[in-house]
Amino acid sequence: MTTQLESIRRQQKDSWNKISSGWKKWDHITMEFLKPMGDEIIRTLNIKDDDIVLDVAAGTGEPGLTIATMLTSGKVFITDIAENMVEIARENAIMRSIKNVETITAEVSELPFADNTFDVISCRFGFMFFPDMELAAKEMVRVLKPGGRIATSVWNAGEKNFWVTAIMNVIHKNIEMPAPLPGAPGMFRCAAKGFMADLFSKAGLKNVAETEVSGKLNCGDAEGYWNFMNEVAGPVAAALGKVDEQLKATIKNEVIESINKRYPVGKTMVDSNGIIICGEK
């Protein structure tokens, strides 16, 4: 891995470890928010009772934990680059008495598994953050059995994801942000139509298909949305961590005004939209 890609990888790991406590705190809301995309991933994978499953970039454990509950003799390996997130996934498995899982801290470009190990692979909202997406796809294909299936989700364009743009647009308006490095991770990096399908095809997958799934982020109200995004969204936490309290208050007021303008007060169900991509080896 080049020096630039290695630097991005370290930044990603540090960022996810830092906000892991926020993910643990807001886990119920986050998992309900992301559930429609996870459900579609599971549907496309056509899980069988004895499947050996890999869940990449699983964060606090989904959809891997849900898949594990569907297996009678199979097993799920849950991986993430951030050890703090992996620990939360392990705690969630214990709390839900799910025993057919193994949690492993692993980088997607160097998966610690032999060729042709897994029947299916899931990856919910990971690709946008991988330093080298082509290498990540090829590595997943390497550990997938012939005939096995991969399904992933990425965020669609910004105009379909107000849950992100409501706060990030205000941040960019008020804070001079450095231009991202070419190819750097970002929420909408994989949003272009056909982008992921082309990536999957180049990695050697066939019967590649894409579909859209919409969702709603329910934080209760605009204040809840502000608190949630501050503690769960890495780019938000990083940007706001560098400003003084006066500017932060200005940004907060503008964000809450934007949310309340679009949604009735007390009924904040913020729009989201993901693309689910599946393919077969």
Image (cartoon, rainbow, N blue to C red):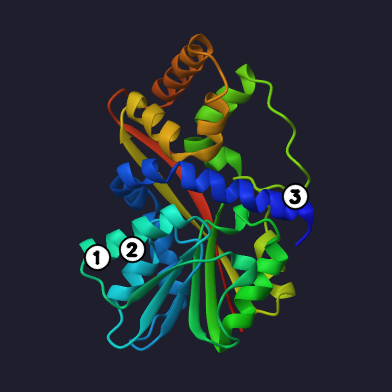
Q: From the image, which quarter does the N terminus lie in?
A: bottom right
Q: From the image, which quarter does the C terminus lie in?
A: bottom right
Dot label at residue 94: 1
| Residue type beneath disc 1 | Ile
Q: Is mark 1 on a helix, strand or loop?
A: helix
Image x and y of residue 161, in percent: 52, 41
Image x and y of residue 148, in percent: 53, 85
Q: Residue beneath label 3, please?
A: 183
Circle 2 residues within 10 Å: few <14, some 14–19, many ≥20: many
Please say if 252 is above or below 71.
above
Q: Which residue is drawn at 61% across and 52% down?
A: 129
Q: Residue at x 42, y 46 (%)?
A: 20
Q: Residue at x 38, y 73 (%)?
A: 102
Horizontal arrangement in the rendering, residue 196 relative to residue 105 (left or right)? right
What whole-number distance in Å separates the C-alpha atoms at marks 3 and 1?
Answer: 38 Å
Q: Earlier in the sequence, mark 3 or mark 2?
A: 2
Q: Which residue is drawn at 76% across and 42% down?
A: 181
| Residue type beneath disc 2 | Arg
Question: Nearest the camera: 57 or 146?
Answer: 57
Q: Residue 111 appears in which quarter of the rendering?
A: bottom right
Image x and y of residue 191, in percent: 64, 51
Horizontal arrangement in the rendering, residue 27 relative to residue 198 (left or right)? left
Please say if 35 is above or below 204.
above
Tell me if residue 246 can be seen: yes
Dot label at residue 90: 2
Circle 1 residues within 10 Å: few <14, some 14–19, many ≥20: few
